[in-house]
Image (cartoon, helix red, strand yellow):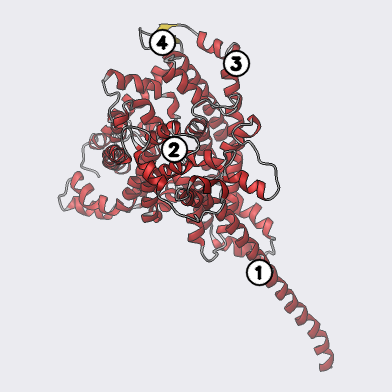
Amino acid sequence: MSAETATIALPDTADSARANAATRRMEKISSTVRYTILIVVGFIMVYPLLWLIGASFKSNQEIFTNPSFIPFEPTLDGYVEGWKTSTPYNFGQFYWNTFLIVLPKVIGTAISATLVAYGFARFEFPFKRLLFATLIATLLLPNVVTRIPQYLVFRDLGWLDSYLPLWVPSALAGDAFFVFMLIQFLRAIPRDMEEAARIDGANTLQTLIFIVIPMLSPAIVSVCLFQFMWTMNDFLGPLIYISSVAKYPISLALQLSIDATEAFSWNKILAMTVISLAPSLVVFFLAQKHFIRGVATGGTKG
Amino acid sequence: MGGDSKYLGLAYVTPYIIGLLIFTAIPFVASFYLSFTTYNLMSAPVWAGIQNYVELFTRDRTFQRSLGVTLSYVFMTVPLKLAFALFIAVILNYRLRGINLFRTAFYVPSVLGGSVAIAVLWRYIFADTGIVNMVLLSVGAEPVNWFGDPKYALFTITLLRVWQFGSAMVIFLAALQSIDQSLYEAAAIDGAKKWQVFTFITLPLITPVIFFNMIMQTVEAFQEFNGPFIITDGTGAPLRSTYLLPLYIYDSAFRRFNMGYASAISWVLFAIIMVLTLLAFWSSKRWVYYAGDRRS
């Protein structure tokens, strides 16, 4: 009897053991497939950037013959030529101009977006629903519709060929995305501490500065970083408003230099491209966590 | 906070109200008005009725070409980019080792991507003697005249934007990671297959994020400017096959100073975006699932 049960039971366990092994093998295969896809895609994603950096250290001849990103005979010729640009100024000037655009814009954005988000998230006031609806509408409103009249406004104010058209709208909480992002963060922060501060006699501005901003600071850092990147990437704004080369930011200087550089000096062009990307690349790698958190929160909670 | 004046909140949002009026609301109305005028900046705008619009749709071949190019660009770019972003996000969601490294690699292009520098890079990667053709030659394939052939030029710009799927992917990944694990466990107990789990659990739960990404990417794609402008030196070459509407608006407004005509083109573009957005919102009742909503 017992032998019989054993013979009946045995194939059963052997089957399930085989089934388990099969599942494990399947798991192993699919995890290999996943890694392969990730590595191939990751390689395609990163290769253009690697190639760019490598090629900027190659001689012109080598760029056309060596597809690898590692230069055989590294040279700084591209950078020496590229730094000078094809304009009367060098990249030092354009870095400085960019800094002059970015810094006030980022500060203005951080202050105005925080004030406005605080107003929306913590107070009741007349027309609040209507104003909040306009905020959402602005989020979806394509800039292309308002661009021409905005240009006319700045022309009438005499602000053309200055940085004011780039600074002022942001200093008036013009980037709805950032206000919206901060409102989302604020809604997730409990109000207990603020209420305690109010009971202790702090006014709303003191509460904002001493209680809310410290808690909100990771989100404000994200706002600053995104605004930094967007401003670095912005091309159309400076293209429309800045006309003298002495005031050009990096983006315009690069475009101008490329049009003026002889088509065959690729290493000069690629070196200029790396010089233009360098600030953004450095900031990104120093602060990548903030970027990823910023996108994830701004997106999913919306 | 009870004792405060009801105008206190209004004080905090004052910067927004001023900005809204000067830089958004008034320009919005003004742009609509300008679209019915002829205005070359030299003299005051002259009322022209619907003449600009009639011109656009009956005589202006450039506009019709540009509109067609814009629509094919958007309908090619947005689905490709979203599908790719979701595909990679699903793979990354398997809690693999090294996920942070991969996530960074996929994310970098979307942070830098809008810049002039990346458009320049693209122009040189896909040049006749660029790296892409070098690779094609080395595997024995025919090199392609990427930016010279009207068949491929627009697609190359689509590739540039699909390459920047990273930010959409990060949003998908965050949504995937927030799905309640007990749902998957329950499905496993019921013996659900992987594709069933994906179709009936994962996909419905992330529809709000698909919806959000779809709207944002569509609005963005309709306004694409930097890529084609820099790659083609603003011409939209070859044969205007990359001459998207924002390029045409820029030329009309800031090169030819036809502010009225350019406003009319902007409003056509805006109307298309608005109709598509409203369609998406209207259809979302049927396919977007919100947790806690009984309807679905």
Q: CA distance from mark 1 to mark 4?
A: 68 Å
Asked if both marks, 2 and 3, belong to the same chain, the answer given is yes
For the N terminus of chain B, the image quarter is: top left
Disc 2 secondary structure class? helix
Disc 1 marks a residue whose amino acid type is Lys
Q: Nearer the viewer, mark 4 or mark 3?
A: 3
The disc placed on residue A28 is 1
Q: Which residue in the structure is indicated by mark 4?
A: B39
Mark 4 near mark 3, Cβ–Cβ under 8 Å?
no
Task: Tell me residue A212's x, y (percent).
Answer: 26, 50
Task: Tell me residue A28's x, y (percent).
Answer: 65, 69
Disc 2 marks a residue whose amino acid type is Val
Q: CA distance from mark 4 to mark 3?
A: 21 Å
Whether residue B26 appears in this view of the structure is no
Residue A192 is left or right of residue A252, and the answer is left
Q: Looking at the image, which is closer to me, B134 or A59? A: A59
Q: Which residue in the structure is indicated by mark 3?
A: B61
Mark 1 near mark 3, Cβ–Cβ under 8 Å?
no
